[in-house]
Image (spheres, rainbow, N blue to C red):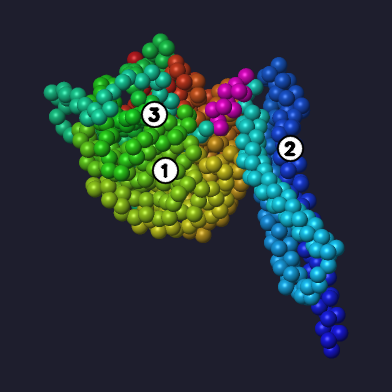
Amino acid sequence: MNSEINGNRGVNVKLWRWIATISGLFALLICFLIIANYIQMNRLDPVNTEAVNLLVQRLSENPNDEALRNEIRALDLLVRKAYFTNQWQVRTGGYILLISLAVMIISLQILKAAKPVEPDIPNASSELDQLWKKLSRKWISIGGIAILVIALVLAFLTHDKLSETFKEAAIAASADPVEEEETVNQMKTNIKSAGALASEEEIEETKNEESVEIPAKADENKENSLTESEQIKAEPKTASVSAFTSSARKNYPAFRGAGGLGIAYQKNIPVDWDGPTGKNVIWKIKTDHKGYNSPIIWGDRLFVTGADEESRYVYCYDKNTGELKWKKAVTNIPGSPANAPDVTEDTGLAAPTATTDGINVYAIFANGDIIAIDMNGTQVWARNLGLPQNHYGHSSSLQVYEDKVIIEYDQGRSPKVMALSTKTGEEVWSTPRQVKISWASPVIAERKNHTEVILIADPSVAGYDVHTGKELWKIDCIYGEVGPSVAYSNEIVFAINEYASLVAIGGGNQPEVIWEDYDYLSDVPSPVAIDDMLFVATSYGVVVCHNAKTGEKYWEHEFDNGFYASPIIAEGKVYLIDRDGIMQIFKADKTFQLIGEAALGEGAVASPAFADGKIFIRGEENLYCIGNGN
C-alpha cells in the first residue's frame, strides 16, 4: 500500500517538475524575445524602409503619377495593419509571460510541499554543497527577476514606440511628399472636433479684466432680436423635427450647425471670394486670443472663444458689421484650477466650440471651466467640471437641446456624458461611460420616436436619451484616439477614425454594422451625410463620396492640401476649407463637380458658420464675413 502511494507521489513530483521547468524556460524565452525585439526596433525602423523612402522619392520627382500614389496608399493600409498586429503581438507576449511565470511559481510551490523532510546529519562536505546551492539559487533568482523586469518594461516601451512609429508612418505614406514633414509634425497632435488656429500675436489683457461692454447703437434696443434670421424660412416641419430644432436651423448655434450634423439650412451662400483683394469680404477683424473653435451664430450675434495660460474669454460680435459688442473674461470660477493644464500647441486652451440657444451662450475651456453668459454679456452661471485628464487637451464641443447643455466628458478619469440645466448649471443627468479619451463632439439626432445624443470613443459608438441620459444602444466597432464626430442621416450612424475603419451602423436600438470600409479614413475632419450620400474628408487631402446605404464609392478626389475643418453641406453644395484657407466648393452629388475654389488669404482649420446669405470663417489671425456682391 505504502509503495503504491509513494509510486503515485513520485509520478506527480516528476510531472510538476517538468511543468515548472518547461514554463520557466518558456518564460525565459519570451523575455529574451521581448528584449531582442526592443533592440531591433531601436536599430532598425520597422516601417521607414528603403522601399518606402524610394517610393516617396519617386513621387516627389513625379507628383502626377497616380499609380505611384495608389501604391503609397496601399502601403498606408499595410502600415495600419502592421501597427495593430505588432501591438497585439507585444501585448499578447506580455500576457503569456505572466501566465508562464504563474504556472512556474505554482509548480514550484507544489514541489516544495511534496518534498520529504530529510534528517539533518552534520557533514562538512554537505554543508559546503548546501551553501553553494543556496548562493546559486539566490543569484539565479536575482538574475531571473532582473530579466523579467527588464522584459516587461521593454514590452511597455515597445508598445508605446510602435504606436508612435506606425502612426507617423501611416501619415507620411498618405501625405504629399512636399508637405510630408509638416504633416507628420502637426498630425501627431490632434485638434479634434473643433478648431481654428488663431493669431500668434497676443494682445496683453489685465488678468482680472471683467466684461467689456460696447455701447449699442440707438436702433439696437431689442434683446435677442433675430433681425434678418427671422426672414429665413425653416425646413418644412415634420413630426421628427421639434420646434427647438426648427429654431436652431434658422440660426447656426453649434459646431457643424444645428445638432452638430454638418447641415446648414441658410440660402444664397456665396461661392466666390478673395481675401487678399477683399472681393466679397464684407468685414474682417483680427482676433486677439488664441482658440481652435468655430464661430456660432444666433440672430445678429456671432460668438467665438479664446484663451491663454492666464485668461479665458468669450467674444460677441455683430455678425452684420463685425463690431465687438462685448467680451467676457471667465474668472473667479469656483473649483477652477490655479494653473492652466498642459496641452499641445495644436489643441490649445480654447478648442471646443461654444453653443447657444438664443438666450445664453455656453462655453467650455481646457481647464474644465464652463460658463453661461446672456446675450448682453452678463454671467448667468459658471462652474468647474474638474480638470480633464487629457494628453492633448480637452476639445469636445458643446451642444444645447431645449433646457439642457450636453457635454461629452470622455477623459482619462471617470469618462461620462452629462447634461446641465441651461438656467442654473446644475447637473440634470450624468451617465458614466466605459471608454477611452475622445476628442469627438456630441451629435443630436431626432430619430423616428425619440431624440438622442450620439457619441463616439474607443471602443464604442453609443446613443443616449437626451432627456434622461439613459443609454439606448451601444456597439463596439471603433478604436484608437478618436477625433471625428459621427455623421447621421436616415436612421444610419456613420463612425470613422484613422487606423480603424469607416462604419455604417443601422438597426436603431439593436445596432448592427451595415457596411464597413478601410480605404480613406480621417483622424480630424468629421464626415457628413445627406440623403443617400456620405462625404468623408481626410487630413491628407482626399475626399470620398460613398453610397450611404451600401458603402459603394461614387467618387474620390485628391486636393492639393489637407483638411482639418469638417465639410458642411449648404444648398446642395459641400463647403470644405483646406489648411491653406482655400474653400473647396463642390456639388453634393454622386459625381464630382467642382464649383469653386475661394482663397481666404491665410491658413484656416475651423469649420465655417452660415447665416443670412453669408459665410463666417475663422482664420489663423482674422475672423471673416463673406457675402455676395461686395
Residue under the point 65% across and 35% down? 165
Task: Characterize the local packing of mark 3: few (<14), some (14-19) or many (20 or more) Cα atoms within 10 angstroms.
Answer: many
Q: Nearer the viewer, mark 2 or mark 1?
A: 2
> Which is more toward the observer, 434 or 63?
434
Q: Check the image and report above or below for 64 versus 510.
A: above
Residue under the point 48% across and 31% down? 344
Task: Characterize the local packing of mark 2: few (<14), some (14-19) or many (20 or more) Cα atoms within 10 angstroms.
Answer: few
Tag shown at residue 410: none
Residues under numbered marks 2 and 3 in contact, where contact means CB atoms less than 8 Å apart: no
Tag shown at residue 291: 3
The residue pinned by badge 2 equals 39
Q: Nearer the viewer, mark 2 or mark 3?
A: 2
Amino acid type, mark 2: Ile
Q: Mark 3 or mark 1, which has the lower sequence index?
A: 3
Task: Characterize the local packing of mark 1: few (<14), some (14-19) or many (20 or more) Cα atoms within 10 angstroms.
Answer: many
Looking at the picture, how far across and down is residue 271, in whole percent? Answer: 43, 22
State the separation of the CA atoms marked 2 and 3. 42 Å
Looking at the picture, how far across and down is residue 194, in whole percent? Answer: 43, 34
Residues under numbered marks 3 and 1 in contact, where contact means CB atoms less than 8 Å apart: no
Judge left or right: residue 621 versus residue 167. left
- Provide the residue span drawn in magenta: 178-188
The residue pinned by badge 1 equals 388
Looking at the picture, how far across and down is residue 360, in whole percent? Answer: 25, 39
Amino acid type, mark 1: Pro
Residues under numbered marks 2 and 1 in contact, where contact means CB atoms less than 8 Å apart: no
Q: Mark 2 or mark 3, which has the lower sequence index?
A: 2
Judge left or right: residue 381 versus residue 234. left
Q: Mark 2 or mark 1, which has the lower sequence index?
A: 2
Q: Secondary structure at mark 1?
A: loop
Q: Secondary structure at mark 3?
A: loop
Q: Is residue 398 visible?
A: no
Which quarter shows the N terminus?
Answer: bottom right
